[in-house]
């Protein structure tokens, strides 16, 4: 077995590989750019080598720099993670020439299947049903428009070397095809060092289901079930689960056998994923094969007990797989939510900055485990597990140079319903401050009827949130529970306040029992009957809630029992109440005396400043280009400028007709959130 492995990646996947290598007794080497000097993967590794400036095309994807780090440290093998150089055959070739093992498939398999154009041609020649498209190289935007018309809109414009949603655009007309081609080409060049583009028909209302395969160098290959990845935003997966709530055993077997046959046809070894789109009648169509570890691999590990990273390392060292297909058992259900540094209230635009607070829920283990090729024991009914794969820490910086994903929160349980319930609690318990993040949106998805039923397609987010995400409106029953909890917490805070002030000896008797709780446009008059174990909150007009908790004023996370049910709240103190976040809702909860509530109703509402004649930068980023000039009349929907952040280009468009009166930024400028890019008459 190898003594030392270099991880040619960063962030959470580098940390993930380090954990398994450490478990196997293998030393690890991290590489890092200027932006990642203090990164978690650098701190975790046994050694670390600096490889250049922050942009990936000047550091992480420069093969010569990675090779020099290998020589410098004497690493015997390299795990590429995903993205960056993971599907670069030239990198695999360079490692082979150096006598260093690649923890991934052979160079030939990468060339055959890692390139999306080549893989589709091979699949077609093998008789595999594929989506209609143009597999040749596309010279320019004019040719992209011509091809798109031949295929028929809508079309998907994709980077040949792409992955993770980078270099992908959907075009519904000629203008979008022209813009999408150029943006995809730019993103592909920046992210993968390869700007080749191809176009295929965009199949509406599909489900995205992928098969995990694992092959060794001795001709053995198995599939480890499937993952449902239909909930995507801008072609980037957000929620994944295993198994799929849609497939039956017959379809699973057919897809799995086809995936393994395809892998064997190209001499594949290591872990890989064959992606399919599946229609409502369970017809499936080959999309592509990812010749690497997938981001969402933890859900497969949780339902099979197989450590895929460990098996990749063992296969790279020449070992045979310790199991055969008949040994594979899918136990329970696992769900993964991707935590992104992006603001759902600003159209999911990237957010950067310092993590002033980062407290994931406690990780717990449950489910089956692979021991010497055999699964040992089922988890007891009702037991759940929480796993959080992350690459950040409290006080760390989220950079504008890399992918916005900062963690993958996973839950496992014996049933899908229990796994969803565990995920709801885990999301509510996840504390992140200092940046915009998508935790509220993930909570909203977990409560959405379509997700709960399992009846979703890749159009889920576009259909259910067509105008973006602006928070969750909680049901009245949920609001009453939160109101009761906040009334009880406010009473505890008032007792603490009077005790600290020293103004009252018998403080508990002096704190009032009648309060008015206002939240989400509703107001509840309550009377609190407290005792040593907790408080009973009685609502005017009927209804009472028993609240117990060990919450202490100042705690930012409160775990309470309300009528015997667990309620987890993120709590912040504000004047006359709390800022409360729960189940995707962000609430200003005011707890006032009846007299205070009466006076509050007379206060005028403060209006926000008028920015309707300004184009504000919606995120920290770099101005790539400005498409208009002073004095130009613009129409609604017209492109005004392009801002790049976290490897994604974002075209900012006019919201209405107007005339440009002033431009404050030019190409190459770095802007902060809400900086004024231009103004209009």
Image (cartoon, grey):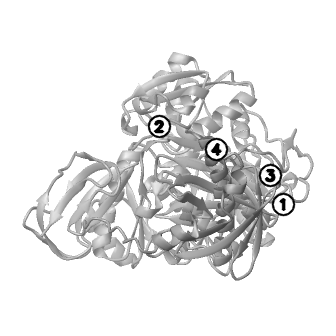
Q: Nearer the viewer, residue 586 or 22?
A: 586
SS label for mark 1: loop
| Location of residue 147 in the rendering, given as x and y in whole percent from the top left corner | 34, 71
Residue that label 4 marks: 389
Residue that label 2 marks: 90
> How far apart, in angstroms, are the residues tagged by discs 2 and 3?
33 Å
**Comes first in the chain, label 1 or label 4:** 4
Residue depth check, mark 2 versus mark 3: number of the one nearer the observer: 3
Residue that label 1 marks: 414
> How far apart, in angstroms, are the residues tagged by discs 1 and 3?
12 Å
| Location of residue 278 in the rendering, given as x and y in whole percent from the top left corner | 63, 73
**Comes first in the chain, label 4 or label 2:** 2
Residue depth check, mark 4 versus mark 2: number of the one nearer the observer: 4
Residue depth check, mark 4 versus mark 3: number of the one nearer the observer: 4
Q: Is residue 636 visible?
A: yes
Q: Which mark is residue 304?
A: 3
**Comes first in the chain, label 1 or label 3:** 3
Against 166, is 463 above or below? Answer: below
């Amino acid at each position: 077995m190898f003594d030392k492995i270099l991880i040619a990646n960063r962030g959470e996947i580098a940390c993930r590989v380090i954990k398994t290598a450490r478990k196997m007794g293998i030393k690890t080497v991290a590489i890092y750019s200027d932006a990642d000097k203090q990164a978690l993967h650098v701190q975790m590794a046994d050694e670390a080598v600096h490889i250049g400036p922050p942009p990936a095309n000047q550091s992480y994807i420069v093969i010569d720099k990675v090779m020099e780090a290998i020589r410098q440290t004497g690493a015997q093998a390299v795990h590429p993670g995903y993205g960056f150089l993971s599907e670069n055959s030239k990198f695999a070739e360079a490692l082979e020439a150096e006598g260093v093992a690649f923890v991934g498939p052979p160079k030939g398999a990468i060339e055959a299947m890692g390139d999306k154009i080549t893989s589709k041609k091979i699949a077609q020649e093998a008789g595999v049903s594929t989506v209609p498209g143009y597999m040749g190289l596309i010279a320019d935007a004019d040719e992209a428009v011509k091809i798109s018309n031949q295929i028929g809109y809508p079309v998907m414009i994709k980077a040949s070397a792409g992955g993770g949603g980078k270099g992908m655009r959907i075009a519904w007309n000629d203008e979008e095809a022209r813009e999408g081609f150029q943006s995809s080409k730019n993103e592909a060049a920046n992210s993968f060092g390869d700007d080749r583009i191809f176009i295929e028909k965009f199949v509406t209302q599909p489900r995205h289901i992928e098969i995990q395969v694992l092959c060794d160098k001795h001709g053995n290959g198995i599939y480890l079930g499937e993952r449902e990845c239909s909930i995507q935003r801008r072609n980037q997966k957000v929620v994944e689960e295993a198994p799929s709530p849609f497939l039956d055993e017959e379809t699973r077997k057919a897809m799995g056998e086809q995936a393994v046959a395809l892998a064997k046809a190209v001499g594949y070894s290591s872990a890989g994923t064959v992606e399919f789109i599946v229609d409502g009648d369970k017809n499936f169509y080959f999309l592509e094969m990812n010749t690497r570890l997938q981001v969402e691999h933890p859900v497969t590990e949780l339902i099979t007990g197989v450590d895929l990273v460990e098996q990749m390392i063992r296969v790279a060292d020449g070992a045979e797989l310790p199991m055969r297909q008949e040994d594979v058992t899918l136990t329970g259900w696992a769900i993964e939510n991707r935590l992104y540094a992006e603001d759902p209230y600003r159209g999911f635009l990237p957010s950067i900055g310092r993590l002033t607070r980062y407290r994931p829920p406690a990780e717990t283990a449950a489910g089956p485990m692979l021991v010497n090729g055999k699964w040992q024991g089922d988890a007891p009914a009702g037991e759940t597990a929480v796993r959080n794969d992350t690459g950040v820490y409290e006080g760390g910086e989220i950079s504008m140079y890399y992918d916005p994903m900062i963690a993958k929160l996973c839950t496992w349980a014996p049933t899908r319903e229990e796994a969803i319930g565990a995920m709801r609690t885990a999301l509510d318990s996840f504390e992140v401050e200092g940046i915009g993040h998508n935790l509220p949106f993930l909570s909203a998805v977990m409560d959405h009827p379509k997700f709960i039923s399992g009846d979703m397609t890749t159009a889920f987010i576009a259909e259910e949130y067509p105008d973006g995400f602006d928070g969750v409106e909680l049901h009245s029953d949920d609001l009453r529970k939160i109101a009761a909890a906040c009334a009880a917490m406010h009473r505890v805070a008032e007792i603490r306040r009077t005790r600290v002030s020293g103004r009252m000896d018998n403080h508990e008797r002096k704190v009032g029992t009648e309060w008015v709780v206002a939240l989400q446009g509703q107001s509840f008059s309550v009377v609190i009957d407290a005792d040593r174990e907790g408080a009973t909150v009685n609502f005017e007009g009927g209804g009472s809630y028993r609240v117990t908790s060990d919450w202490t004023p100042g705690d930012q996370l409160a775990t309470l029992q309300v009528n015997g049910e667990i309620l987890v709240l993120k709590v912040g103190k504000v004047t006359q109440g709390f800022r409360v976040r729960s189940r995707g809702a962000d609430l200003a909860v005011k707890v006032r005396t009846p007299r205070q509530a009466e006076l509050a109703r007379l206060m005028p509402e403060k209006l926000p400043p008028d920015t309707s004649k300004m184009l504000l930068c919606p995120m920290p980023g770099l101005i790539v280009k400005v498409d208009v000039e002073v004095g130009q009349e613009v129409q609604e929907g017209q492109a005004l400028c392009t801002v790049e952040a976290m490897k994604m280009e974002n075209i900012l468009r006019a919201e209405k007709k107007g005339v440009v009166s002033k431009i404050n930024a030019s190409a190459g400028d770095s802007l902060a959130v809400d900086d004024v890019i231009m103004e209009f008459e």
